[in-house]
Image (cartoon, rainbow, N blue to C red):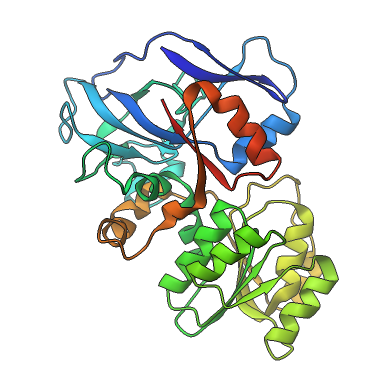
Amino acid sequence: MRATVMYGAGDVRVEDVPDARLEEPTDVVLRITRSCICGSDLWPFKSMPADEHGRRMGHEFIGVVEEVGREVRTLKRGDVVVAPFAFSDGTCEFCQEGLHTSCVHGGFWGNGGVDGGQGEAVRVPYADGTLVPLPVAEDDALMPSLLTLSDVYGTGHHAALGARVAPGSSVAVIGDGAVGLCGVMAARRLGAEQIIILGRHAVRTDLALEFGATDVVAERGEEAAERVRALTGGVGVHSVLECVGLQDSLVTAIDIARPGGTVGRVGAPQEPAIPSARQSFVRNVTIGGGVAPARAYIEELLPEILDGTLQPGRVFDRTIPLAGVADGYRAMDDREAIKVLVRP
């Protein structure tokens, strides 16, 4: 089968890899019908050291069940399913607490000999605990929005929960990528009254306004903090969704939170330490968030996608065939595209 392999910074190839096959009785094999490129895939695209063995890529996908292990109980051949960006058994104490990314038997696609999601097929470990059946056909028009349940919409929702977004609250979202845009939608869904998007790209911030943002701040650093305070009576926002992962963005997040406010950080950290420790301490700013347990949120977020109330799939602004995935990475890295959908 064909799949995406990264061999180093800027070196993404689609090549033949061993076919996905059942290895454990709890596995299924999926034929992938939709996958995509994540903003977090761009970090290795920018900086991965050369590796002659390569790294399988992709962690967001929808597919059709083709083979079923003998101990799988909730899935059958032909089911259309969405996979969260981490696999999990669904039964351990952390899964039961809704923290599937800490599953004692779980892991992440493309690691430890597990297939990546940017390919023609994938072996899914712990299929009963990982996959969620979708009540639609494999080519349904809702597919782009359903695919966001794999990661970016669930991650935006996790940021909003981590930031304690509440009805009537004020919110700032740092980052105008797919996660930040989904964070705007999640904050509006949770009842926020004022939502400020911090971003510099009009196409993206215009979409944020359509998703529910009330204000746009294009400045950065202290100028951005001053603008946010000016929009909030001088005090800052109740909740900040930090959807970038760079130190400067976290400094800004802490700076624009009001005393007693909360930062929900979901941007993959690119620095080893949390900055502004004294400032956050003195002002009683809580810093929450982390790796989003996307599996925990799928059933909650699914109905409003199925009935068309919410359309997070609008973050996809380019679709490419699997053979063109390298160009998709380049387009996202050059900010020509917000998020690229891949069709095998």
Q: Residue drawn at (47%, 10%), measured in percent from left and top? A: 17
Outermost residue toward the bottom in this view: 233
Residue 163 appears in the picture as rendered? no
Question: Image quadrant of residue 120?
Answer: top left
Question: Image quadrant of residue 131?
Answer: top left
Of 141 and 270, the residue lying toward us = 141
Specify the quadrant that holds the C terminus. top left
Position of residue 26 measured from the top left corner of the image (x, y, whole percent): 25, 25
Q: Is 281 left, or right, of 86 in this rendering?
A: right
Q: Residue drawn at (72%, 26%), measured in percent from left and top? A: 48
The mark tally for this picture is 0
Q: Is 191 left, or right, of 89 in this rendering?
A: right
- 5 relative to 199, above or below: above
Q: Is 212 left, or right, of 310 in this rendering?
A: right
Position of residue 343 measured from the top left corner of the image (x, y, whole percent): 42, 30
Specify the quadrant that holds the N terminus. top left
Position of residue 236 measured from the top left corner of the image (x, y, whole percent): 69, 81
